[in-house]
Image (tube, grey):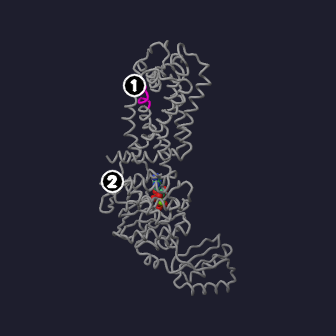
Amino acid sequence: MKRYGEVTALDGLDLDVPGGTVLGLLGPNGAGKTTAVSILTTLTRPDAGTAMVAGVDVLADPRGVRARIGLSGQYAAVDEHLTATENLEMIGCLYGMSRRDARRRGLELLDQFRLMEAADRPLKTFSGGMRRRIDLAGALVADPPVLFLDEPTTGLDPRSRGELWEAIRDRVQRGTTVLLTTQYLEEADQLADEIVVIDHGHAIAKGTSEELKRRVGGEHLDVHVNGADDARRTESIMNKVATGPMRVHHDEGEVSAPVANGVEALSIVLRELEEQRIAIVDIGLRRPTLDDVFMELTGHEASAEASQ
Amino acid sequence: MSMLRDAATIARRNMIRIRRVPDVMVFVVVQPLMFVLLFAYVFGGSIDIPGGSYREFLIAGIFAQTVVFGATFTGSGLAEDMQKGLINRFRSLPMSRSAVVAGRTVSDVVYNALSIIVMSLAGLAVGWRIRGSILDAVVAYALLLFFSYAFSWVMACVGLLVPTPEVVNNATFVILFPMTFIANTFVPSESLPGALKTIAEWNPVSTLTHAVRVRFGNLPAQTPEPTAWPLQNAMLYSLIWAVVLIMVFAPIATRLYQRAGSR
Ligand SMILES: Nc1ncnc2c1ncn2[C@@H]1O[C@H](COP(=O)(O)OP(=O)(O)O)[C@@H](O)[C@H]1O
Ligand SMILES: [Mg+2]
């Protein structure tokens, strides 16, 4: 458990990550993801509770833990006046590697991440995505058996995101254990063997991405109409096909529902809307998102907290 | 042992920055150079020091002021590392707990040594001379560097407490300007009025300046023996200050570093 004054950031969170697997900690902004990572990486002491990382107690032997982990925080923490090589060499040395080994390993990683162009130029001149990947490379320099990645792809363009996923998968294949936090179901889906969904500092669901998605329903039907009146009428139509709680924004004219059979639900709703002469702005099927998982699990929207 | 290694790694990193960050260059090289030249030419002729040359008199003062301000780098550097999340990264590494701050204070010494070399050369060019023995001069330089090293630990605490490097700079200017001016850096403390005179006499910047001035043989011949104890024992008094500053602020700085939270 961890409190910041009045705020209880973590409240009875239990995590168990088998060696060599990836645990995805999925939750909206303010759910307690960074707090959990900070405790496990010895940056913050919990107010109550215990944690073991790679068989070492974070409270009893924080230094032992630090020697076994790599951390890539939510914001890239690189020295922007140093080149990528200098950054990685510095981190390697601080892990206790010799300068030569640190340098060699750094270059290896830059090559693997296709970051060679940053090797000899100060990072100031490079994009956020680039710094993010160098930050991740920093976490890998010493080949730690356990890796903590706090929202590794938030704010990255799709291409860098894909490349980062590739790099993470590669580590896992070599036996690294990963705890990854994310706001995106898709990311957890892509990388995690098991997903823990957290909200207000405690776990509200646990399972593989398949299990979670089954709970949320296969697909989602989104309908966009004009005005609150039409939205209300659309809501009652969609009620017939919805398999779980719907999300309705009357003023925006948006109605969204989980459905079992997408195509069938789509045609039923289309037909009814036409019969009732409700003009459609937009209609479509999509895969469930974190918002949907939240709606299903908590009955409230994730984005409501995201604003605070 | 690992503490020394880690501190060296951090210091090495700070040294790379001096070549890349123009601000650092300006502060370490250009500003001290300008101080020497401006004071020498603007005030050098206008203030009379009985039995001596004002130019020679003020060099020690400029040295002392520069190295005290030089300690600011530790503060602003740490505040910047905090702001950029680097401190958290360091705290997640299996490195010595005091190495980050120690590395900073060490690189400050290197910066300050550089400033002193530049100022000494400029001073020689405008007519300043070391009139004492070489050994005395070496002691004077060592005292300057040791005092500023000690002062870096104070600045380290400031840097770890404030949210941004700018705050460090603003705060230190407000404190350091009076501290380096209410002293005998630029005028003899005897010429200061009442309370200011007493403050100046007990100000460690004064005793630092005085000790250095004496060792350089730059004290005008007709200067009366100081009456205040700190100035009479300028070397000892300055050293005591430096040692006490380190003993008090080094543990505090290390503690602050360990607590330094996620923003
Ligand atoms: N240093 C801090 N001081 C005060 N409150 C904090 C601090 N860090 C986090 N919190 C609060 O704790 C809660 C969890 O935050 P965090 O762990 O950062 O969530 P997430 O990473 O999932 O977005 C939030 O309500 C946040 O405002
Ligand atoms: Mg976070």
- Image quadrant for the C terminus of chain A? bottom right
Rendered position, A277 above or below B29: below
- Image quadrant for the N terminus of chain A? bottom left
- Label 1 sits on a secondary structure element that is helix
Q: Chain of mark 1?
A: B
Q: Position of residue A172 (x, y in %)?
A: 39, 70
Q: Amino acid at mark 1?
A: Leu
Q: Amino acid at mark 2?
A: Arg
- Give the quarter of the image for residue A106: bottom left
Name the dominant secondary structure of the magenta segment: helix
Residue under label 1: B135
What stretch of residues is rendered in magenta? B134-144
Rendered position, B49 above or below A237: above
Rendered position, A33 above or below B238: below
* Badge 1: residue crowd in 10 Å (few <14, some 14–19, many ≥20): few
Query: Residue A134, which numbered label?
Result: none
Q: Is residue A36 visible?
A: no
Left or right: B142, with A232 as reference point: left
* Badge 2: residue crowd in 10 Å (few <14, some 14–19, many ≥20): many
Q: Position of residue A54 (x, y in %)?
A: 32, 63
Closest to the observer: A80 or A63? A80
Left or right: A191, with B46 as reference point: left
Q: Chain of mark 2?
A: A
Q: Is residue A246 visible?
A: yes
Left or right: A274, with B55 as reference point: right
Q: Position of residue B16 (x, y in %)?
A: 48, 47
Q: Residue at x 62, y 24 (%)?
A: B42
In this rendering, do the residues under marks 2 and 1 share a single chain?
Answer: no
- Label 2 sits on a secondary structure element that is helix
Residue B250: say if magenta: no
Query: Residue A63, which numbered label?
Result: 2
